[in-house]
Amino acid sequence: MSGLLALLDDVAGIAKVAASSVDDVVAAAGKAGAKTAGVIIDDAAVTPKYVQGFAPARELPIIWRIARGSIFNKIILLLPVALLLANFAPWLITPLLMIGGSYLCFEGAEKIFHVLFPHGSHVIDEDLKNRDPGHLEEQKVRGAIKTDFILSAEIMTIALAAIEAPNVWMQAATLAVVGIGVTVAVYGSVALIVKMDDVGLYLAQNALTSVGRSLGRGLVRAMPGVMKTLSIVGTAAMLWVGGSIVIHGMEVLGFGWLGHHIHDWAYALGHSVSAQWTSAVEWISKATMDGVFGLAWGMVLIPLATKVIMPMFGKSGAH
């Protein structure tokens, strides 16, 4: 009997330790997730464009496919690599982050380039018109998962840097919680956004009150503008996040003059206004300068990517 009681006491002790570990993981995940806020905004703003132009019945399945790809990116591909890098080759993290940030700058700059010079995408538009919807959907999903891989790599690396875990298992558990939590939050939000016009249409046709029907009509009318705004926000976020990652990487590698100047300029602008606006102006100034650098760096990368890198892999320069 005493042996049984001792065993039960040991089990209770193990349960307490496990519960404490779960609490630690959740707390660490919350802290690490907050550090990735900028990239999460980018991810949520960029993704809705991948379901534009498809039948409403295909919107949620496409988002689900992208979300599954995102989970695979984070948990199966990136989590083990992040742990290996952190524990055996931490010096590689900054250069890899800078490559990912440069890709985001290129993507954002190329979108602006095609807005300024719309003839550049004429061949693409004609090509897409001649493809069947199934092929186009497959292409869009692959493109979304590719972009998600870059954003997920940034999220997981930033989260890893924010984790103060005593061992690799705690790091792994925390990263898994961050990865799954971010994916659910991002793609759940995207699903709500892209189906909001359907909700509006349903309310406009079936609401029991005039207020409900008016709300539905308002949602239907508002959603094209919302989607366009999200596209603009997504592009700006790509340039901001990519530019800030590259600038920070330069500082880590010993080339901190640009980052220091941006910090000083943002500080001066923030302290040129009244005290209650100082933090906001300083943050907006820094984000804007990071984004301008991201745009400039992306424009530099466009000819390199389209004329050198993409042809090496047999890809068209425009997409």
Image: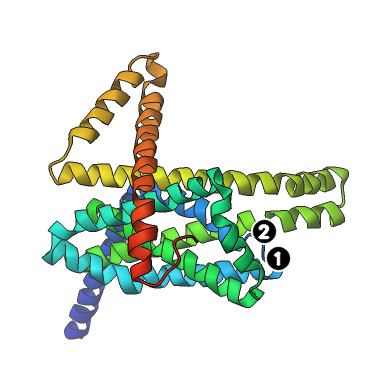
Position of residue 68 relative to residue 248, above or below, is below
Q: Residue at x 29, y 62 (%)?
A: 174
Mark 2 vs mark 1, foreground winner is: 1
163 to 72, vertically: above or below: above
Kindly indicate the quadrant of the structure image that contains residue 264.
Answer: top left
Instruction: Classify mark 2: residues with Cα within 10 Å, few (<14), some (14-19) or many (20+).
Output: some
- Looking at the image, residue 61 sits to the left or right of residue 37; the answer is right
Residue flagged by tag 1: what amino acid is it?
Pro
Q: Position of residue 233 (x, y in %)?
A: 51, 44
Q: Which of disc 1 and disc 2 is earlier in sequence?
A: 1
Instruction: Please tell me which residue lies in front, 48 or 67.
Output: 48
As drawn, the label of residue 56 is 1
> What residue sits 71% from the left and 67% below the top?
55
Q: Is residue 135 above or below residue 275?
A: below
Q: Secondary structure at mark 1?
A: helix
- Compare residues 53 and 185 and report the one nearer the observer: 53
Q: CA distance from mark 2 to mark 1?
A: 8 Å
Q: Give the residue type that dot 2 points to.
A: Lys
In the displayed structure, does residue 119 sit left or right of residue 9? right
Q: Position of residue 244 (x, y in %)?
A: 31, 42
**Horizontal side of residue 237 vs 245, given as left or right:** right
**Closer to the camera in the image, 80 or 52:** 52
Residue at image mark 2: 195
Marks 2 and 1: CB-CB under 8 Å? Answer: yes
* Residue 74 in view here: no
Image quadrant holding the N terminus, namely bottom left
Percent of width and height locating residue 176: 33, 66
